[in-house]
Image (cartoon, grey):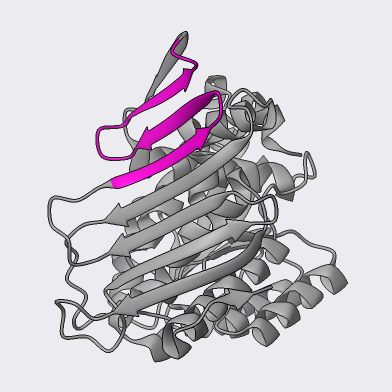
Amino acid sequence: MNFTQAGAVLDRSRVAISPRDSQRSAMLRVAVIGCGSISEMHLRSYAASGRARIVALADPLIERARTRSAPFHARSYSDYRKLLASERLDAVSICTPPFTHCEIAVASLKHGLHVLCEKPLAMTLEEGKYIVKVAKDSDVTLMTGFCNRFYPPVAKAKVWIDQGKLGPLHHFRMRFAGLELMKGSWLAEPSQGGGLMFESAGHYVDMFRFLIGEVKDLYAKSARRAQDIAGSDTVAILVESADGVFGTLEGSWSSPHSEKRIEVYGEHGAIVIDYITKRSRFSIDDEQTEWVETEDSAYERFYWEINHFLDCVEGKTDPIVTGEDGLESIRIINSAIRSAKEGRAIRF
């Protein structure tokens, strides 16, 4: 499936109604491993789907697991291995820090469970390849959590670009920046998968690949500009696609009053997607302008991602974002890290 079929993915007639108790036995049984902030989006989306029952959560901080599980009357575990051994499940979301992804994903896949793993899929290409192999051997769905593919304006942009409405493409720009203080969090520690280059730039790379195409070469810079953390807080990556489209990918955790935007420019038109105002513009030759507005962007893209994952679990479709997409993101980001370290361009 691709996003020329986006209407099926974004069909708003499926927005959630709480199921009756008599329907609960037919619902998919899911667990969430890792109860940090991102888990809230997964939990809220599973509950809103009306198709899944949240039966268990796991987190090393058991009180955090209990707090997250209480609204769903789910069981709590401090050890994900005990959860996997004790529960009858169909699928899991992995919402833990990246350095744990390989171990947890492999264990879940070997239990025959479908897996939605938050990005990055793994810390290294070798780990990622192993996860993908185990998923194939286990004949289950593995999705990497690139939620921005499911943001409605991005889905619409994909359709317009694939239809050639913008003509030959020239330039892609993505800037996600703001003020987020990371000291004291795993997000500050590269050894745990933190630092803006590894933790966030995967989204920038995935959006370029999804909307524009494969990366041919890149040149990157990263630095700690304002925060006392081990990882980078500011990055800039210049990329070129196999078709010669330029991309500038920018991010910062230390830029107050900044932007969260995706821009695509072609010979005949432009697309500007603004995550802050939640208004997006699609224009062609000054003759046509369409607007897309969203009410709650942070939740909405996770809602459609989770619904697509559930469709895959039920065998209704194939994932539009795969383990292989997770692998390619790891490869490109690790190349960007090397480019920044060595001060040179990397060609694939």
Q: Is residue 90 visible?
A: yes
Q: Is residue 165 left or right of residue 109?
A: left
Give percent across and percent down for residue 2: 72, 38
Write the residue at 53% across / 74% down.
333
- Would you say residue 279 sits in the magenta stretch? yes
Write the residue at 69% across / 86% down.
126
- Name the foreground residue: 209 vs 120: 209
Give percent across and percent down for residue 252: 27, 64
In the figure, 67 relative to 50: above or below? below
Q: Is residue 91 left or right of residue 206?
A: right
- Would you say residue 324 sits in the magenta stretch? no
Q: Is residue 184 left or right of residue 235?
A: left
Image: magenta residue range: 260-286
In the figure, 320 relative to 12: above or below? below
Quadrant where the N terminus is found in the figure? top right
Give percent across and percent down for residue 313: 72, 50
